[in-house]
Amino acid sequence: MADLNFKEDMMTNTIADKINALRSRMAEESVDLIAIGPGAHMKWLLGFYPHPDERPCLLFVSRTAETFLMPAMNAEGTRQETDIGFHTWDDADGPDAALKAALSEIGAEGARNVVVDEAMRADFALLVLDALPGAVHSFTGATLGALRMRKGDDEYRELKKNALLADEAMKAAFAAARPGMSEIELADVISQSFIANGARPLFRIVGTGGNGAFPHHHTGETVIQAGDVIVIDIGAQAGNYPSDITRSVVVGDAPDDYDKVHAIVDSAVKAAMGAAKPGVKARDVDAAARKVIADAGYGEYFVHRTGHGMGIEVHEPPYITSTSDTVLEEGMVFSIEPGIYLPGRFGIRLEDIVILRADGPEILSELPRDAHKVSV
C-alpha cells in the first residue's frame, strides 16, 4: 500500500481534530471568525449539514469556541447530529437577536478579520458582515479550504474505493458499446453498474462521434455509428466521496488519426504526472500537459484546464490551470485530464484522479489508458 504518513494536520479524522486544525490556521492567518453555511465546507468539518433553505443557518467558529445560528424549526432534527450549541430563531422574530447572541457567546462580536464561506447564500454573508461593521472579510482558501485540499487516510480510502467502482462502470461501458445504441442507452449501462456496486450515479457524459468534441456534451439520443470515437466521462458516489474518470473508446474501425491523437493525449497525461511534485505550482503542471499538445500541432484543440481538485465535491481546489499559483502539497487530490477536441469529428480526453505523494502522483484508478477498441 502507498505511504500514508502525511504531516500532522492531515491526520484530522475526528471533528475535534478538524476544528483544532482550523483554529491553528485561523491563528496563522490572524482570522478572528469563520462563518460557514450549510454545504460542502460544513459537511467536511462536521460530517453533516442542516437542511439548507432561505432561513439563515450558520456555523460560527472563533479562536476559542463555536456555535450555530439555527432556525428553530430545524433545531430538533439537527440536535441528533451535533452537540455544538444553538442560538435559535423563529420566523416571527427573525435572526438578528440570535445572531448577536451567537457572536457574543464565542467572543466574536468585535471580530475584525472575518472569513465567510464562499459557497453560502449571499444574503447569509451580508447578514454576518452587516453585524460586524468595519470588519474585513475574505474567503476560506487560506483556512478551511487549505485543510480540505490535503486528504487524510480515511478520505484516501474512500476516494480509492470509489475510483475502483468507476473502473468497473467504465469496463461495463466498453463491453456494451455497439453501433445502433444511443448515448443515453450506454449511459444507462454505466448507471446500472454503479448502482449494482452500491454507488449513486452523479454524472454520465457520453459523446459519440462529433459530440465528443464538446467537452461537456449533454448525453442524448444520438445513435452510435460504426467508426465512432466515444468520449465517456463518469462519476458516482459511495459514502461521502465521489469518483471521476474519462476514457475514449472506438466502435469498429478507428479514424485514421485516432491512434496518433490518443497517443498525444496520453503523452500529455504522462508529462503532467511527471511535473506534479510537492512544491510545484499548479500552473507548471498545466504547462507540461499543454506543451506536449501544442508541440504536436493541436494546441488550439485543448480548450480547458488540465485538472481540478476532488474531495467532498467533484470539483474543488486545487485547480490545475495555466494561471494558478497554488503550490502543490503532499496529500492533495486532483485530476489530470488533458484533451484534444476536433470539431465535427471526435474528441479524446483521458482523465485520472491522483493523490500527490512525496515522490509524485499516485493514480487512484487501476484502469489502463489504452486506446480501447470494440470490434463490430
Image (cartoon, rainbow, N blue to C red):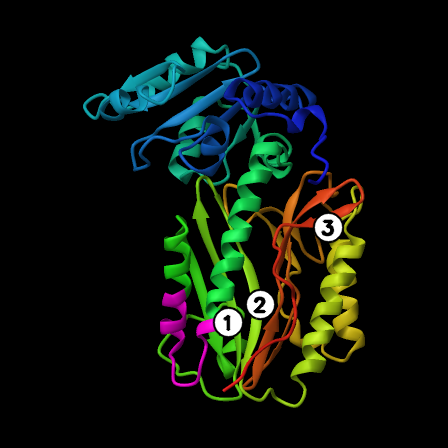
> Label 1, on which residue?
174
Name the quadrant containing residue 123: top left
Q: Inspect the image, locate mark 1, and give the three-letter code of the amino acid beneath it.
A: Phe
Report the span colored magenta.
Answer: 174-189
Asked whether disc 3 touches disc 1, contact meaning CB atoms under 8 Å apart, the reply is no
- Note whether 61 is above or below 208 in the view shown: above
Asked whether disc 2 touches disc 3, contact meaning CB atoms under 8 Å apart, the reply is no
Q: Inspect the image, locate mark 2, and give the three-letter code of the amino acid beneath it.
A: Arg
Mark 2 to mark 1 CA distance (whole Å): 10 Å
* Residue at 37% over, 72% down: 184
Looking at the image, can residue 112 be seen? no
Image disc number at residue 282: 3
Q: Image quadrant for the N terminus?
A: top right
Magenta span contains residue 182: yes
Q: Inspect the image, locate mark 3, and give the three-letter code of the amino acid beneath it.
A: Ala
* Residue at 73% over, 50% down: 282
Q: Is residue 7 left or right of residue 348?
A: right
**Mark 1 crowdedness (10 Å alpha carbons): few <14, some 14-19, many ≥20:** many
Is residue 292 or residue 195 the one in the foreground?
195
